[in-house]
Amino acid sequence: MSLIEARGLAVRLGAQTVLSGVDFDISPREIVTVVGPNGSGKSTLLRALIGAVPISAGRVTRAQGLRLGYVPQKLQIDPTLPMTARRFLNLPVRATPRKTAAALERTGAAGLEARQLADLSGGQLQRVVLARALLADPQILLLDEPTQGLDQLGSAAFYRLIEDIRTDLGCAILMVSHELHVVMSASDRVICLNGHVCCHGTPEVVASAPEYRALFGSGTQGALALYRHEHSHRHDHDHDHNHSHEEAH
Amino acid sequence: MLDDFMVRAALAGLGVALAAAPLGCFVVWRRMAYFGDATAHAAILGVALSLMLSISVFAGALSVALLTAVTVTALSGRGQAVDTLLGVVAHSALAVGLVAVSLVGGRVELSAYLFGDILAVGRGDLAVIWGGAVLVLGLLAWKWSDLLTATMGADLARASGIDPGRIHMGMALALAVVVAVAIKVVGALLIGALLIVPAAAARPLVRTPEAMAAVALVIAVLSVAGGLWGAYHVDAPAGPAIVCAAALVFVLVNLGKLLARK
């Protein structure tokens, strides 16, 4: 049973067709990454799946009563709006102080409750936004370029955090990213997008697909290999993730 | 007690402040300042129409304000930038309103609706003002969390099951109601000020949205009291005096913040 399923999805923004004929589905506990060049419709796909953009053809089916946690590309914080991390974590549903503290702890942002969102660093803000998403007890986390503005080390740490969260909470994860090498090693499945689905499959399959090479060149292969040794577990199994991630780190 | 025009003026001002201050915070956060102005200017057309048709000024102002709010909200994002669209609608409506008023016979004291005439507020006006204020305040209190979430980000709201489009329309309608009830008190040209200035003055003093709404409310009430008191003693027009008082608070707060930092 898929959490979210799309068939023949098309989205037009103004006169431009951004997505067409996209088939997509994600199962419980799966980590799926969408990669693609700028303007390939990655973010639009994510927004279409949560119902934030009207679709012009096809259909999107979400599982009944699906709880989703969403981490936007970059949270725009208007300087006129005073907002502490604590208040933000309670939007729109109030959570107990213990729960908010635990969520911040989980994402490595413990003790930031009283800080203004505008005063947080990029990495801290992303962790607070992620903590808020976790408070919804999501069955699926959707992350739109979650590591934009983070340095290489910072984004590697963030992706590790995402994997840990999947292991602990058992939620599915759908990520959009352009950081191919880091992202792909953490994914069960990769979808390469460029207005339509160019190719999809396990990271290995996508990395060696001619369509992928045509979009990104073969230069990323080396970087992918670099990360490969950290994740020695198999990627081509069914979706039964009972293996330990400890061995990988 | 309601026989005294000063008491009625104070109550009217209080009612408008009660709705305008918290709503004004959202106007500031959501960058809808120009939207408020445009709706207020368009309401002058409503005033002119109601004078021509001999119907209640409140009803006329409310209808046109609502119509403007809905039209602009529905048209926005369809090729024209929202501020351009607002400019076209607001200025056209204001101009048509002014021409219409002069065609009625030119006997109408329009400045009362441009700058407000709080000292002429009657019992019926009080009921309208407080009715509108309670309505808007109730709406804000009821949907507060959803409104804040949608203000933080449309997609963020959508992912939480909140329709940001409906929130935006709700804000526009609430603004139209405040404009309609406030037009007699501060006038079309100063409604924007009563929405924005208390919220802006409150911003440096607070750390949460709720605190900002509360402090803005206090500042708005103080401004109404101070403005009326000042207007009474130096015989100045009351509406502008209220806005002057709010502006004074804004300046003092920012000066104080500046000095505190040194």
Image (cartoon, coloured by chain):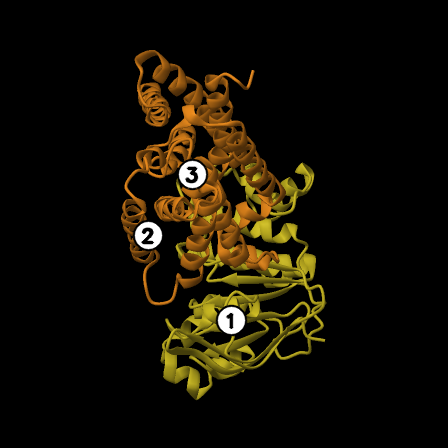
Chain colours: A yellow, B orange
x, y percentage for residue B236? 30, 19
Disc number placed over residue A54 in the picture, else none:
1
Residue B167: where, in percent of width, then height? 53, 53
Q: Vertical placement of B33 versus A148: above or below?
A: above
Q: Chain of mark 3?
A: A
Q: Residue at x 40, y 39 (%)?
A: A80
**Residue A106 drawn at (x, y percent):** 62, 48
**SS for dot 3:** helix
Residue A88: image quadrant is: top right
Residue placed furthest toward the top: B233
Tell me which amino acid carries mark 1: Pro
Q: Residue B56 versus residue A215: which sits nearer the camera?
A: B56
User: For mark 3, what is the residue?
Assistant: A119
Q: Kindly tell me whether residue A111 is visible in this rendering.
A: yes
Specify the subunit that label 2 lies on: B
Q: Which of pointers 3 and 1 indicates the residue nearer the eye?
A: 1
